[in-house]
Amino acid sequence: MPQLRIGSETIYHEVHGSGEPLMLLHGGYCSLENMRELGELLSERFEVHAPERAGHGRTADRPGPFGYGRMLDETIAYLDAVGLESAHIVGFSDGGILTLMLGLEHPGRVRTLVPISANIDVHSFVPDDYAHETVPQAAHEQLDRDYAKLSPDGPEHGAVVLEKLLAMWKAEPDIPASALRAITAPTLVMAGEHDVVARTHTETIASSIPGARLVVVPGTTHMLVSERPDVVAAEVRGFLAGVASGQD
């Protein structure tokens, strides 16, 4: 069933495909719809789990501020609820941050990590006069439409969610690059060519994780998971195949 009870809360999630478990973690103010095509492509080879966090997609918001620590706890609770000891983790934007945090704080729960367009501090973004090009206006409008269509809290609650997200983004995350050296899972770092996260920041993330690979997808923005899901899926599948064969 799409609705899953975890403790006293209920979230929306979908599971598709068969094979080794792979969890998709969506971005802030997004839903699994932004990663649906990517998930469908990956489900051809993996059992894809796609939960929607509190205040996102079809999962109701909860009282209190957002924070990556709380989101991380919710992610672990999801793995427990569906009986997954470990999984491949593919996360976009906020989901990419959670992917890195899982690798750092719960290494036994991850098989591989694919953080996409992630950042580790609040000083990682391109200048404001360029940022509008990295998340096209059409993408912003689509996110608003998706929220209005999907949220059980109603379209008017979108402003509340955005306010809570902006407050979080101004203060978090704060992960020292040196801390990433502790990640032991095979890692593929991805970003868009014209990402809102500065290229140098993405390169720092990749170079700080032992053995990590870096792939920048040409002609894409921060929304590369929905702009070129075919390319992202091919890179992820190739990376995981390499890990399975011992080549990565």
Image: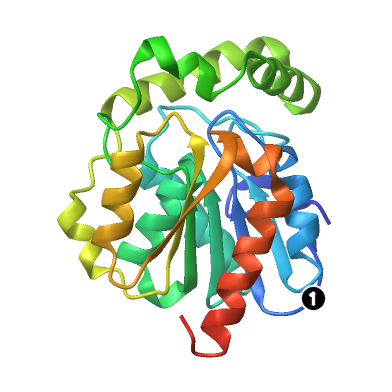
Look at the image and tell me in which quarter the N terminus lies: bottom right
- Splitting the image into 4 quarters, where does residue 6 fall? bottom right
Q: Residue furthest bottom?
A: 245
The image's colour scheme reads rainbow
Q: Could you say which is closer to the camera, residue 3 or residue 200?
A: 200
As helix, strand or loop, the secondary structure at mark 1 comes to loop
Q: Which residue is mark 1?
A: 18
Residue at screen point 18% across, 49% down? 176
Q: Residue extending furthest front? A: 218
Q: Would residue 12 be seen by someone viewing this image from the given angle? A: no
Q: Compared to 233, does 19 lie above or below? A: below
The structure residue drawn at horizontal position 47% and vertical position 40%, both measured from the top left corner, is 94
Residue 175 is situated, as x and y percent measured from the top left of the image, at 23, 47
**Numbered marks: total:** 1
- Asked if residue 120 shows in the view, the reply is yes
Give residue 20's position: percent from left, percent from top: 67, 79
Give the residue type at disc 1: Ser
Q: Residues within 10 Å of mark 1 (few under 14, many from 20)?
A: some
- Tell me which corner region of the image, top left, top right, bottom left or bottom right, holds residue 183: bottom left
Q: Is residue 245 above or below residue 222?
A: below
Residue in the image at 39% along x and 34% along y: 197
Q: How far across and how far down the image is residue 47, in percent?
A: 74, 71
Above or below, 205 relative to 161: below
Specify whether 50 is left or right of 113.
Answer: right
Seen at 65% across and 69% down, the residue is: 237
Rendered location of residue 247, percent (x, y): 49, 86
Q: Quadrant of residue 218?
A: top right
232 is higher (above) or lower (below) than 109: above
